[in-house]
Structure formats: C-alpha cells, structure tokens
Amino acid sequence: MLDVLQQILIFGMVLGGIYALASLGMGLAWGLMHVVNFAHGEWIMISMYTTYWLSVLLHLDPYLLIPINIGVGMAIGAASQKFVFAPVSKRGGGALMTILSTFGISMLMTGIAQALWTQTIYTLPNPYINTSLRIGSISISAAHLNGLVISVVTILAIYFILKKTLTGKAILGTSEITGDTEAASLMGVDTEKIKILSLGLAGAATGVAGTVIATFYYVNPTVGITWGLLGFVVVTLGGLGSFSGLLLSGILVGVLEAVGDVFIGQAYGYILVYAVFILVLYVRPKGLKGRA
C-alpha cells in the first residue's frame, strides 16, 4: 500500500508540474491583460498538431520542435490581441465582449481543425512514452519527466523575463492588473505594442505546453476543451499574478487527479479535483496565492 501511495504522490507531482505549464499561458493572459482566454485550450491544440505532423512527416524529435511552436504560439497570441481583443476594447466592448470573442476564436479554431483532420485521434509515436525511469517501486515515463523539466525551465524563464528585463517591466507596467496603462503611456511606453507582446508571450507558453503534452496525450480537434478547462481550474485555484501559486495549484490538481484515478476510477478522477477546487475557493475566493 505504501508503494502505491508513493507512486501516486510522485506521479501526481510530476503531472502537476506539467499542468502548471499548460495553464501558464492562460495565467499570463488573465493576469497581465485581464483577458479570460477560453480559446487557451485550442492554442495548445494547434501546437499539439504542429508537433504531431512535423514529427511524423519529417521524422524529427518532438522536443526539437519547441522553438517552432514558440513561434506559432506567439503568432496566434499576437494576432488575437491585434485583430480581435484590441478592436473589441477600442469599441467599448468591455470584459464580457472580450471573453465572448475568445469563445469565437475557440469555435473557429476547433472548426478548422475538424475540417482538416476530422475527428481522427492521433498519438505521437515517440520513444519517450515507452521509456521509464524506475527508482525502487516508483516508475515514471521519460515523456512525463522531460515534460516536468521543460515546464519548470519555461516557468522560470518567463518569470525572469517579466521581473528582470526592461521589456518585462514594461509589460508589468502596462498590465491592467499589476500596472497602469495610462501612466506607462505617459512615460513613453508603446502600450499597444506591449499588449501585443504580452499576448505573444502567453501564446509562446502554450506553444511549449502543446509540444510537451503531445508526447504523452492524444491529439484531436476537441482536445482543447480538456486543457482549457484544466487551465481555468489551475489558474483560478492558484490565484492571479502568482507564479508560485500556479505551480502549487498545478501540483495539487495533479496529485488529486492521480488519487482520484486510483481510488475512484479514471472515468471519475476529476470529481475529486473539482470538489477540492470548489472548497478552496469557498475558503479563499482569491485562490491559494492570490492577492489579498
């Protein structure tokens, strides 16, 4: 029994680190731009398809595609801000119209994916999912371990960009949550370009996440629903604007899912996740690490 518990805990923590990366793009869009991006899962889905097709057709290692998917994600995020979110905001659409526009993007991207690839389920052939690291009775696939390492590195890299670079400070200063757009503009910051860059950064995070997830998860046009909902839960549970909260809530969700899968059944594993999610928000409405 102890061996089973150790396996559940370790696997849940590894999975939780990946969940934190999968939620990072939504957290950045929400925490920096006040954009609740319900197309987040579809951004990840596009990167998963990019990883699958380039790996299969060109016989490339999926992790070598991370730079390409960063570019794809940045393009999607920047285009969404420039051609959708900014025009909606200028026309006085407000937060609700911005949220609705993300639903529109979500449905558009899902429809395009269905037209191109129907409902076929693809799995990426790669050596990592079938290779495991075993320590005593604990066994974790290389795909998940690699994903954890890449997740932590990506989160730390974006934290460094935001906190330690001039561009990052401009992003935080322009943010509708952490800064003051009008004050930043008066100081010479091109706020429109910075907002585009902010959503581009969020898109880049989803590009990395899509690459990692494709190494162990199936790919189809509706897979974004799963990852979008997961991102919403992790970001809300962790609290806006907190990198440590994002990582903590990701690990919590990963462990709860692993426990639920074993003791309740895989079909019902998320029941435990959502039950704890509601309980935590009842006690701490701003999340585990949210600003008071």
Image (spheres, rainbow, N blue to C red):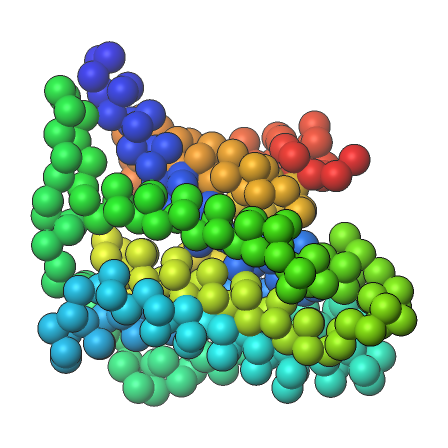
Nearer to us in this view, 289 or 174: 174
Residue at 14 percent across and 78 percent down: it is: 58
Task: Specify the quadrant of the image occupied by residue 65.
Answer: bottom left
In the rendered view, does 130 fall on the left or right side of 42?
left
Task: Specify the quadrant of the image occupied by residue 206.
Answer: bottom left
* Total numbered circles: 0
Image position, residue 121 (x, y; %): 23, 68
Residue at 57 percent across and 77 percent down: it is: 78
Q: Residue furthest top?
A: 2
Image position, residue 193 (x, y; %): 68, 78
Quadrant of the image containing the N terminus: top left
Quadrant of the image containing the C terminus: top right
Nearer to us in this view, 165 or 54: 165
Nearer to us in this view, 240 or 110: 240
Q: Is residue 134 above or below residue 106?
A: above
Q: Is residue 154 above or below residue 44?
A: above
In the rendered view, does 110 fall on the left or right side of 149?
right
Q: Is residue 44 visible?
A: no
Image position, residue 259 (x, y; %): 35, 28
In the rendered view, does 108 fall on the left or right side of 186?
left
Q: Is residue 192 visible?
A: yes
Image position, residue 32 (x, y; %): 68, 59
Residue at 53 percent across and 59 percent down: it is: 25
Q: Is residue 101 above or below residue 180?
A: below
